[in-house]
Amino acid sequence: MQDTFQTLVSGLSLGAVYALVAMGFSLVYRTMGLVNFAHADIAMIGAYAASTFYLTSKLPFAVAMIVAILVTGAIGLVIERVLRPLENKDFDLMLIGTIGFGIVLQAVAILIWGTTGRAVPSPLASAPLDVFGIRIRPYDLLVMGVAALAVVALSFFLSRTKRGAAMQAVAMDHEAATAVGIDVGRSNALAFAIGAGLAALAGGLVGPMLYVDASLGGALGIKGFAAAMLGGFGSINGAVVGGIAIGVLDSYAAGHFQGYSVLVTFLLFTVAIMIRPTGIFGERTVSRA
Amino acid sequence: MKTRLSGLAAIVIAAWALPYGLGTYTIHVVNIALIYALLAIGMGLAMGISGQINLAQVAFFGVGAYGVAILTTHSGYGFWAAAVLALLATIAIGLFVGIPALRMQSHYLGIVTLGLALGFINWITNADITGGADGISGIPVPTLPGIDLSSEYLYYYLEAVVFAVGLAFGLFVVHTSLGRRLRAMRDDSLAAGSMGAEIPLLRMTAFLLASFYGGLAGILYGGLIRYVAPETFSISNMFILLAMVIIGGRRSLVGCVIGGIGLTLVREWLSDFSTYAQLGYGVVVVLMVVFAPTGLAGIPARLRALRRHRRGHRATRAELRPFTAYEPVEDLAQEPGLLRIEAITKQFRGLRALDEVSLTVDAGEIRGIVGPNGSGKTTLFNVISGFYRATSGTVHFAGTDTTAARPYVLSLSGMARTFQNLRLFGQLTVRENILVALDRTRTRAIWRYALWQPGVIAQERRLRAQADEILDRYGLTDFAESPPAALPYGIQRRIEIARAMAARPRLLLLDEPAAGLNGEEVQQLIAIARSIRAGGTTVVLIEHNMGLVMSLCEKVTVLSSGKIIAEGTPREVVAAPEVIEAYLGDSELSELPPDQANVPQQDRAKEATS
């Protein structure tokens, strides 16, 4: 029983990171119908940038994080600008274009930071808390807290601010949005930048939990995508639920199947998504044909 | 033809002579390049030809290579026996990975296949039988009597033969019945389904082909390197493979081959600067996607189009020729109730699009279905043709219950339809559009591709002769080789009807066939529809153009808010107060005398719809 809860706790903190990845991914998807495969690599760049500013430039962790978010936001703007001609046109081509960007970002990361990865020490060095025999690292709590804060902030932005509402309008019908005077290009760019920022947040937070190297994006990203799908593509709530589900599933699989955890996670994920292709909160039809 | 043959001969001779001019290392690189070219063909068949985003190709490669490695080193099989078993295993895995494609497409499929590939990588790096991160070494040299395949020079010839046969087979598939259907499915899977293509089986076929080529490449890799390790089958190699296919041109197998060979050579050449190379091809992929989505293979066609554009119109202008009427059938099949719809209800969440609709169409009728926008006409068609499953009620077509039948089943049993917003296969020529519908073979007939190719060729000849006949009948011969999207709207409408009729249906459903046509074209349409009926095909049409309905249909059914509010001859229907109210909202305003509805087509009856 205690083991089960222990697994649950570590699954939750990893799940919070996946949820952040999935949220950025979903935000971009719902606004512009773009499946951003480079999202994962943006998170990887975010992880590297945050760790560099934290370790090398000796900035406080929070400040390093903010700088990393700004850097990746700028990368997001570039990607959006380059792929803009394809928006709302060819879905599959856009997808491949973002994969191209992913390849570029990985190469850039290797050029800047080299092939050997780095371990980032936890900014909260205090000892694990003991709650009813379950050991909880304070850093895990921090990750969950930041993720929760990000969810609330994003929801507030989307529902209560003018720009957020404009973004929702673009998501529903980009032509109608243009007709009422919303600058769709700018709105999309903003969505992309926020998405990239969320990716950096996820990457920066996961730094002290995992090992940071150029392949970090792969592991983080595919699970983040899976989380977004499981929750329902384009749904912010879905991203959170899906992220936690994948995190917990991942952590149980790691406990029970050791080396084969990835295989087990993706087999289970495939079965789940076969049963309900639209995910938990998804309402869009899957086959766009 | 002669230049083609001599070109082919030159390539064969060059391929034969190639090893004589190369050093041992270069021939090794060439061998690797050929393996990647085979992989790229498989990837192109799934992605470019069939439109299935398959990001597990590298796993198929891995299953083939590891299959040979495990079967030879652990189980003691000979190389060729192991190769056959490994190929079968790859195909089995390929079909397994393809199962999600039955439920999801596009990016969903991409993520799931990528996840499964990641699972495979996870397994090979951890399992004992695969040697973990160390991999498996000591794969025996494949044996061929009289040829020492441990020499990379001689291995090159083995690979070249397998590659040439593989490419030829791939091209054969793409340009005949199966490939045409796969491409039709890629362009519009709904329309392809309604032309009799069994979409689920075709999607599995796409994965079967991809895994077949993947397995082949894996086996050759095992025999060449005689050592397998996880890093060869990584996700980043998957993306390189994707780059090969995109840069070469995903819709052309030759393009995929060029991409595969080219990128392998460039990668080898830049192996000291591998990170810069990675940066380079990432950038090239992005540029290609934005500026040349058809890849290198598509550039000649784009240049030609550009030149034609500059030069202005072609000297000989293509024209739409008149329609040749069908031979009237003397005894129209006397089959009352060819289509029987009973109490059909279709519910979309809160919206009841069809409410207990019952309708019977006899053989030999031309039935009109009219109604204001949003009255459920197209929903009714979608239920009849199997796109939607009715919430309740039954549909009988030609005496059998087809309530739950899939579109392709209905197509094969003699129902054809057109679409309100034209669903022609955009990347196929007009001729190919017709050929897709003409082709009545079932997907299971693809065994002939493996075992009896002459049968495929003979069938292809037959189909082409029939297609020429249909193109001629509908006056479309001049446009046979054009992509439909480049043609005027009226011609596209006619192509849709020709395509639907190519299946020789007993019942033809026309969804707003006159939308966007000018007066003259509407007259032609009326003649075509009459001739189709006289030729023995029953016609049901949805139309807003009241003039057309009045002059064409003997019987009209009026839908409003999902219910049938009137049925009878055009004159009766137009006079019915319910109809006037449904169209005009207020019966007091509608002093529309019945004669007025008989006005000619050019009036478009806009007043009736607004």
Image: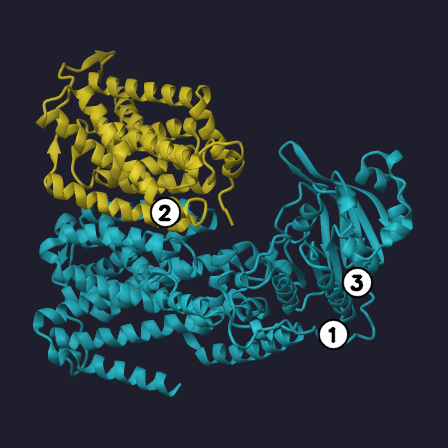
Chain colours: A yellow, B cyan
For the residues marked 2 and 1, what is the alpha-carbon distance in whole angstroms? 47 Å
- Name the secondary structure under disc 1: loop
Q: Which residue is mark 2?
A: A95
Task: Report x, y in % for residue B454.
Answer: 46, 81
Quadrant location of the N terminus of chain B? bottom left
Q: Is residue A63 left or right of residue B427?
A: left
Q: Residues within 10 Å of mark 2 (few under 14, many from 20)?
A: many
Which chain does the residue under circle 2 lie in?
A: A
Q: Amino acid at mark 1?
A: Ala
Q: Residues within 10 Å of mark 3 (few under 14, many from 20)?
A: many
Q: Is residue B211 visible?
A: no
Q: Which residue is mark 3?
A: B363
Q: Residues within 10 Å of mark 1 (few under 14, many from 20)?
A: some
Could you say which quadrant of the image residue B40 lies in?
Answer: bottom left
Task: Report x, y in % for residue B341.
Answer: 75, 50
**Residue B325: numbered disc:** 1
Q: Which of the two marks, 1 or 3, is nearer to us in this view? A: 1
Could you say which quadrant of the image residue B492 lies in?
Answer: bottom right
Q: Which residue of the protein is positioned furthest toward the front in this rendering?
A: B311
Which chain does the residue under circle 3 lie in?
A: B
Above or below, comparing residue B116 to residue B297 in the picture: above
Q: Which residue of the protein is positioned furthest toward the bottom in this rendering?
A: B2
Which chain does the residue under circle 1 lie in?
A: B
Which of the two labelled residues, at mark 1 and mark 3, occupies the earlier sequence position?
1
Task: Report x, y in % for residue B211.
Answer: 34, 60
- Name the secondary structure under disc 2: helix
